Amino acid sequence: MSMKERMHTGELYLPSDEEIASEQIKKLDRLYDFNMTRPTELYKREKMLKKMFAEIGENCYIEPPFHANFGGAHVHFGSNIYANFNLTMVDDTHIYVGDYTLFGPNVIVATASHPILPELRAKEYQFNMPVHIGKKCWIGSGAIILPGITIGDNVVVGAGSIVTKDLPDNVVAVGNPCKILREVNEYDKEYYFKNRKIDYTEI
């Protein structure tokens, strides 16, 4: 099995492998071009993302700068996804994001990790585990999602949280390490922030 194939199996591999590095640098050039686009060049950005990503649906918007180890080549976006400034996708293997999910500024989604044994790190070995994020999630500012994590649908991850374990559907989770605070419930159908009620006649 080649080093490139090992990137997506969870096995140890060398990211400095010539085949991998040659492919990666080309994708990073394309990412650089995306980040240099002007705010008025929305159509150009849309076209570029369709070439950069493994998959991307309709009506997705990423606010530059966007950072990704492979320029989004292993990122799979559904439709209607929004990402604020400085989204970092450590996409050494696959990252899946469902429809209508929102990312606050400075979110990190990481698939790559390194062995605890220092002798293996000295030889530059790494391994990757895919990340799955469901539909209609809100990942708050500065949150970090670690390799191998699965987040269900309709999940809110609080700002600054570090997600070290899987999260089920329909929960609000916060903290370091990120823990479930409560379920999304009837209160959330009436109030959108503290004592502020949702006016359904206006939305």
Image: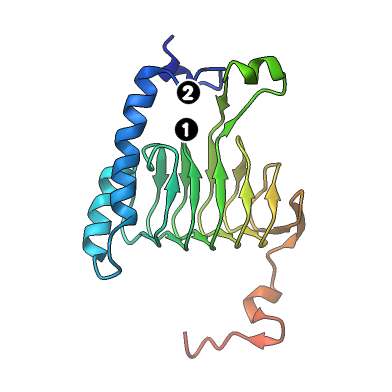
- Say which residue label 2 marks: 15
- Sooner in the amino-acid sequence: mark 1 or mark 2: 2
**Quarter occupied by residue 65:** bottom left
In the depicted structure, whether residue 53 falls above or below residue 169: above
Residue at 49% x, 45% y is 89
Image coordinates of residue 87 in percent, x first then y, are 49, 54
Q: Secondary structure at mark 2?
A: loop
Residue at 66% x, 74% y is 188
- For the residues bearing labels 1 and 2, Cβ distance under 8 angstroms: yes
139 to the left or right of 81: right
Count residues near mark 2 (Cα–Cα under 10 Å), then give few for <14, some for 14-19, many for 20+: some
The reply to whether residue 118 is in sight is yes
Which kind of residue does numbered mark 2 sit on? Pro
Image coordinates of residue 183 in percent, x first then y, are 72, 61
In the depicted structure, whether residue 75 falls above or below residue 9: below
59 to the left or right of 181: left
**Residue lying furthest front in this view?**
122
Q: Nearer the viewer, residue 193 or 66?
A: 66
- Say which residue label 1 marks: 92
Image coordinates of residue 145 in percent, x first then y, are 62, 46
Location of the N terminus by quadrant is top left
**Quarter occupied by residue 182:** bottom right
Count residues near mark 1 (Cα–Cα under 10 Å), then give few for <14, some for 14-19, many for 20+: many
Q: CA distance from mark 1 to mark 2?
A: 9 Å
Q: Secondary structure at mark 1?
A: loop
Residue at 26% x, 65% y is 42
In the depicted structure, whether residue 171 falls above or below residue 27: below
Image coordinates of residue 163 in percent, x first then y, are 68, 47
Residue at 53% x, 50% y is 134
